[in-house]
Amino acid sequence: MSDLERLERFLRTDPRDVGCDEALAVLHIYVDVVATGGDAAGRYPGVAAHLLACGPCSEDFAGLLLAVTDG
Amino acid sequence: MQCARLPAKGPEEESAGWLRRLGADGGERQAAERALHARRVRIALAEVRRRSASTPVTGPELDDVAHQAAGDAMIAILAKLGDFRGQSRFTTWAYRFVILEVSGKLGRHYWRNPPVALDAGQWERLPDRFGIDPARHAESAGILAEVRRVVDDELTAHQRRVFVAIVVDGTPLDALAAELGLRRNAV
């Protein structure tokens, strides 16, 4: 993702976005759905919207998914 | 004669096993804590290395961050064991503490050895950073001047500090949150 795309995502607000606190509170549930091939974005659209917009939470998601799938 | 294969442990059974062993007394609990600790350290080390390109923390200090994160995650996991609701695998729930500890610690450690201080020229370099076509630099310079005017004149001091730190200086959000003493969400 380019810096410009990151900036656009940072400045854009998706009304479904649940914010960092709520996304991180359910991150383990979301990651398990993704890791088992489920439709995480369909079940948790607010979390999916947040992960698209928030770089740090998206990093946490990527790290946890890797830990689970490599672990 | 065919050998029947034992079914692999399901996620619920595996999670229940962790909870039982971590809630046991004596050697069984210690063995479970050691096993979980080994996993946490491995995951924390992998995570700091995965993030190494985006942090000024390097070398042994990076490994220290991983070990601190693994240790602090264990304290949080044991303190919150009763909060586990079985909505995910136990290990996913537990690994989340490790990843979040790594995030938080790298954000705080950023300021021990921050990148070289930035100057006003960062504003002028934004079009390049954002990959704007050089042929459109004159046009983007006008937009940039207007953005800078709005940032200077219309944002509050706090908004201006956050905008300049993240957009202009490229400070990681977790590092800025740590510096301002705020939660990530507040930034």
Image: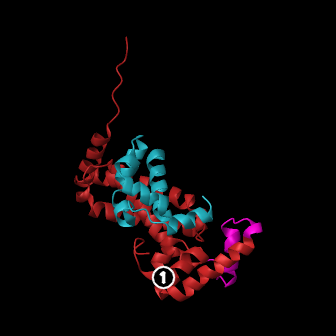
Q: Position of residue B57 (x, y in %)?
A: 58, 70
Residue on which disc 1 sits: B159
Does B1 appear above or below A65? above
With B47 as the anchor, is A44 left or right in this view?
Answer: left
Q: How many marks?
A: 1
Would residue A48 be seen by someone viewing this image from the given angle?
yes
Q: Which residues are magenta?
A: B115-136
B161 or B115: nearer the eye? B161
- Image side of residue B9 versus residue B159, left or right: left
Residue B3 rendering spot, x and y as whole percentages: 37, 18
Q: Quadrant of the N terminus of chain B?
A: top left
**Is residue A40 or residue B83 the one in the foreground?**
A40
Q: Position of residue B128 (x, y in %)?
A: 71, 69
**Which quadrant holds the C terminus of chain B?**
bottom left
**For this view, does A49 lie left or right of residue B46?**
left
Disc 1 residue type (three-letter):
Gln
Identity of the residue drawn at 34% across and 55% down? B33
Q: Residue B183, percent across and down?
A: 40, 74
- The chain whose colour is red is B
Residue at the (50%, 74%) spot, across then down: B175
Q: Colour of chain A?
A: cyan
User: Residue B121: within the magenta?
Assistant: yes
Q: Secondary structure beneath disc 1? A: helix
Left or right: residue A44 compared with residue B145: left
Using the rendered view, name the quadrant where residue B2 is placed: top left
Whether residue B36 is visible here, answered yes or no, is no
Q: Residue at x 59, y 78 (%)?
A: B113
Residue B167 belongs to the span the image colors magenta: no
